[in-house]
Amino acid sequence: MGKTDVRRDAIMHAIKDKGSIALTDIVKQFNVSEATARRDLEILEQEKRCIRTFGGAVLESLKVEVPFFNKMDLYTDEKKEIADKALRYIEDGDIIGLTGGTTTTFIAKKLNQFKNLTVITNAVNIAYELIGTPGLQLILTGGVIRTQTFELSGPLANATLENLSIRKTFMGCDGISLSRGMMIYNELEAETNRRMMKQSMETYLVADHSKFSRSSLFVIGEVQEAVGIISDSSITPEMKLAFKESGAPFL
């Protein structure tokens, strides 16, 4: 087996492990050019081993969901970077919403630096993270919990949100596409996220670069419904330009 075949097998191993891979990750991990990385993905797709997407590839277009605790160990530096960026848009006295997800969990871990904050969330793990934080008022929705993500969703969660007015929501997702929008794996969670976005004056999409090479099943909304996207520094200039031209700039 040649070096090229070994590299492509290693790329497939990474895709199977995480559910997806970004083109930038292939370039960094395997020390190859972007052109070589694209060619590898083209060949792997021709062999029906993966599905190429904008900026990377996925193992299976719609069916792969990585469990929460596994995702917490993926792209941790990138998620910390995103959390630091998100804090720039939060100020004392804010009423913010946090959907479930690992990226929003990293944001929650940094909220103890504010003196007066109201946080509304449908994620049990985020609520647990914030319980007892001085100066923070915490509102947790009702709903049916999904153990894969620790999110509460469904009619009870939506009914709670309908009676609330949120200033800024920070929303995670499982996949992002200019053509399909912001996506998530579960139908009830998608509906609850849509409700939180509707009740918010501003919605910020928070997602690491790997989400831009992943598709998912249920659409939350169009990317243009967010005032902006907060991501990590691995986003390529080409991708930044494409989203800016669509009306959803990176912040």
Image (cartoon, rainbow, N blue to C red):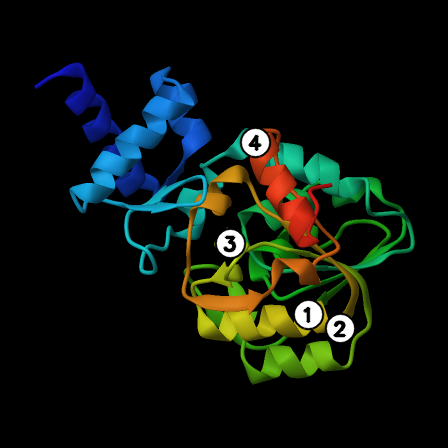
Q: Nearer the viewer, residue 96 or 49?
A: 49
Dot 4: what SS? Answer: loop
Disc 1 and disc 3: Cα gap in Å? 20 Å
Residue type, mark 4 in image: Thr
How far apart are the two marked residues, 4 and 3, measured between alpha carbons? 15 Å
Residue identifier under label 4: 236
Q: Which residue is mark 3?
A: 177
Residue 140 in view of the camera: no
Q: Residues within 10 Å of mark 2 (few under 14, many from 20)?
A: many
Name which residue type carries label 1.
Answer: Met
Q: Which mark is residue 199?
A: 2
Circle 4 residues within 10 Å: few <14, some 14–19, many ≥20? few
Marks 1 and 4, how far apart in space?
A: 29 Å
Instruction: Give left or right: position of 229 versus 32.
Output: right
Residue at 37% x, 50% y: name it: 66
Tell me if label 1 and label 3 are in contact, CB under 8 Å.
Answer: no
